[in-house]
Every structure is written in C-alpha cells, then in structure tokens.
Image (spheres, rainbow, N blue to C red):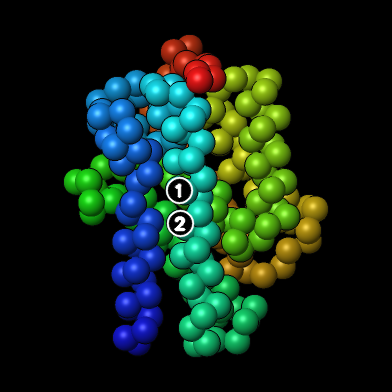
Amino acid sequence: MLIVITTGIFAYLLGAFNAALWFGKWFHKIDIRQHGSKNAGATNLLRVVGWKTALPAFLIDAAKSFFAVKLAVFQNIWEVQSEAFIIWQIALGIIAVLGHIFPIYSGFKGGKGVASLLGMVIALHPLAALSAFGVFVISLVLTKIVSISSMLAGISFPIILIVLFQENRTSLLLFSIFAAILLLISHKKNIKRLLNGEEKRITFKS
C-alpha cells in the first residue's frame, strides 16, 4: 500500500510540472495565464511566443504522463497486461493529467491536459493513440483550430480502439470514453466561442 500511495504522489508531482507555464516564465518572463487565451498550455504558448518554445513544452507535457503510466512496469505489484495492471496504469496516468490541470506548484491553475492525455494514451495503446493524433493533425490542417482538432481526436480514440483494433479490455474502453468526455468538458469555453464564431485559428510564429 505504501508503494501504491508513494507512486501515486510521484505521478501527481510529475504531472504538476506545467512546461508551458514555466517555459513562459523562464524564457520570456511572462505568466502565460495572463496572455492570449489565458490557458496554461502549449497551444496558448504557441499563440503568444511561437513554436520554438511551445513545441518543447508540448513534448515535455506529453512525456511526463507517458512516464507516469510506465511507473507501473517497475513496481512488480501486478502481472503485466493483467486487468489490474492496466487499471493501475490508467490510474497513474489520470493522476498525472490531473496534476497538469491542477498543479500544486502554480496555484492549481494549469492547462487543459491535451498534451498530457496524449502522452498517457501513447503509453497505454501506442497505435490507437497515434491514429487519434492523425485525426488531430488532419483536422488542424483543414480547420486551423486546435480546440476542434483536440475534441475530434478525443472522440475518435474509443472508436479507433473498437473498430480498428477490436479492443475488448473493459478498463481501457471505459478510460477511452472517459478521456473523450474529459476533453469535451475541459473545452467548454472553446465550444462556446466556436458557437459564437469567436474561436481563433492557429498561426505558427517563429
């Protein structure tokens, strides 16, 4: 039990390092939460300071939840790929994503968790995650709107698991549905702006 609790705390603290927020402060002397959409995420960082800072922030925010999920491999608590093992991986990933959304290091005001969620699903099912990311890329090319692309990718994830990969593990399927719902909830302000025709299209600054 002590190992489980300690690992859960570590996953949260790992997820709570918000790269977009800290990169904005370290390299540009700004609090990204006071600029652009005021969201502490890589997309807002891209809008405000450009891709050279936003891309590394995005990769780090994805990597932290990826590694949080992989912590389960080193614990030898449950048999690898058993249902209990997968549930524990999912739990660690969710804890890391929640750490990103509610980071203790910065007043519990973080980002939407899109990059962190991507890292988590790559760790759980790489091919399905990359397929969903393909949906994101295609949508972004066509619409230039990150919020639409993120939500479509999230919605496509459970569909891809079932249709393309014929996934039948209950815990993974339930998580995929939860992840899609979480993305929709975290984008409620974006949905309102989309309905009002106010959502901004992305541009790629240097």
Q: Nearer the viewer, residue 128 or 73?
A: 73
Q: Do the residues labelled 1 and 2 touch (CB within 8 Å)?
A: yes
Q: Which of 87 and 60 is in front in this view?
A: 60
Q: Where is residue 172 in the image (x, y as percent from the top left)?
A: 61, 64
Q: Where is residue 67 in the image (x, y as percent from the top left)?
A: 50, 63
Q: The disc labelled 1 sits on which kind of residue?
A: Asp
- Pointer 1 local density, CA inside 10 Å: few below 14, some 14–19, many at least 20: many
- Pointer 2 local density, CA inside 10 Å: few below 14, some 14–19, many at least 20: many
Residue drawn at the location 54% of the way across and 28% of the way down:
146
Residue drawn at the location 59% of the way across and 31% of the way down:
149
Residue 8, numbered label = none
Return the residue at label 1. 61
Q: Position of residue 47 (x, y in %)?
A: 43, 22
Which quadrant is home to the N terminus?
bottom left
Residue drawn at the location 40% of the way across and 23% of the way down:
49
* Distance between the alpha carbons at the discs numbered 1 and 2: 6 Å
Up the image or down, 82 lies above or below 25; here it is below
Q: What element carries label 2?
A: helix
Image quadrant of residue 123?
bottom right
Q: The disc labelled 2 sits on which kind of residue?
A: Lys
Return the residue at label 2. 64
- Locate residue 173 relative to residue 47 in the image: left or right: right
